[in-house]
Amino acid sequence: MKRVFNFSAGPSVLPLPVLEKAAAEMCDANGSGQSVMEMSHRSKDYKPVIEKTESLLRELMDIPSNYKVLFLQGGASLQFSMVPLNIACCGSAGGKKAVYIDTGVWADKAAKEAAKFTEVDVRASSKDRSYTYIPDIPPGDEPAACAGDAYYHITLNNTIVGTKWTQLPDTPVPLVSDISSCILSEPLDVSRFGILYAGAQKNLGPAGVTVVIIREDLIGHAPPETPAMLRYDIHAEEGSMYNTPPCYSIYMVGLVLEWLKNLGGIPAITRLNHQKADMFYQYLDNSELFYSPVEKPFRSLMNIPFLATAGDPDKLKELETRFVKEAAAAGFVNLAGHRLVGGMRASIYNAMPVEGVQALIQFMQKFEKGAV
Ligand SMILES: *Cc1c(COP(=O)(O)O)cnc(C)c1O
């Protein structure tokens, strides 16, 4: 068996012990004589699987008891619609505006989707400097200043441009955040938020399941014409089993959470993530060929875009293409930047071992010697 170091932004690398456990249990899970894939979601064999996944997530994230955990489908992208539909739509918000902070491609998509259902106020944006920073936002701690706000949406980690929020906005209205690419990567105070959501395929497991963590008072405000599948109240009442949930993905998330807990939970993974990111940024900041375009205070722990310096644009393009190709041949795959922004990007999620980042840096040092 030959494993590569996979720097994909998602779906992304999974911990090897998780894959091995899944493989060992593939045909006979827990003495049931069946694969988890074959189990009825309402069976006595499956019930402990989803219960374990939820309780591990609650434990690792320290989720308060007045929050529900939902396992849904449709990716983070469906939450772009479900959030406004459920908490700001058609009169339930009394003509209030949904506030969005535009910090990148996903934040912009979320705002545009919400605008189909409710009035949106994009209160700040970092588009002017290609999203390389997190904008200052007008203070919102004066309740009067927020009287017209329904909720406040931020994208905590910006997967494509590689920035992260370092300080949460102070707002009396529910704070909603897309945490797809940073869930469980460092401490997060869940009680500061009304709704948190994350597609699993970055830091939690395989694609197919979306985790939604929602404060109970925000459930039950969807207008009556809202389709059942898009209502938080129905999914919450049915324990994420209004219809067939993504059973196997939920099982895999459970294995990833178990792995994380055994590793030492959030304190341990935070240390490792800082070790990896610090090492990589330090290399970029000292390199003569590569650099990080992101302003220092806002650099992501998880997604690190980088660019190369080269004379003319044609030469640059050629150099980047050669880098991505040679890296892949050497076992470092998926280093091309997002198709919308170009350049390169290394996503170093929880499951990327420190050795993977060390080996990538060594490869880049060697490449640099040949190129400059
Ligand atoms: C990947 C990603 C998305 C899109 O997720 P899907 O599950 O594909 O819908 C949305 N937001 C962020 C921050 C992401 O990283």
Image (spheres, rainbow, N blue to C red):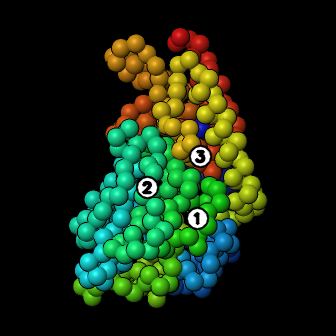
Label 3 or label 2, whichever lies nearer to me, is 2
The residue that appears at 61% across and 82% down in the rendered structure is 65
Q: Are marks 2 and 1 in contact (CB under 8 Å)?
A: no
Is residue 21 or residue 301 the one in the foreground? 301
- Which numbered tag is attached to residue 151? none
Numbered circle sitting on residue 137: 2
281 w.r.t. 178: above or below: above
The percent coordinates of residue 245 (x first, y second) are 45, 75
Q: Earlier in the sequence, mark 3 or mark 1?
A: 1
Which x, y percent locates residue 108? 33, 53
- Of the residues shown, which amino acid type is indicated by label 3? Leu
Please name the amino acid that badge 1 sits on. Val
Mark number for residue 301? 3
Instruction: Sort mark 3 into few (<14), some (14-19) or many (20+) by Cα contacts within 10 Å.
Output: many
Image: 41 above or below 25 = below
Is 274 situated left or right of 193 in this image? Answer: right
Q: Of marks 3 and 2, which one's residue comes earlier in the chain?
A: 2
* Distance Cα–Cα, label 2 vs label 1: 35 Å
Q: Please name the residue that numbered disc 1 is placed on.
A: 253
- Residue appearing at x 35%, y 14% in the figure: 312
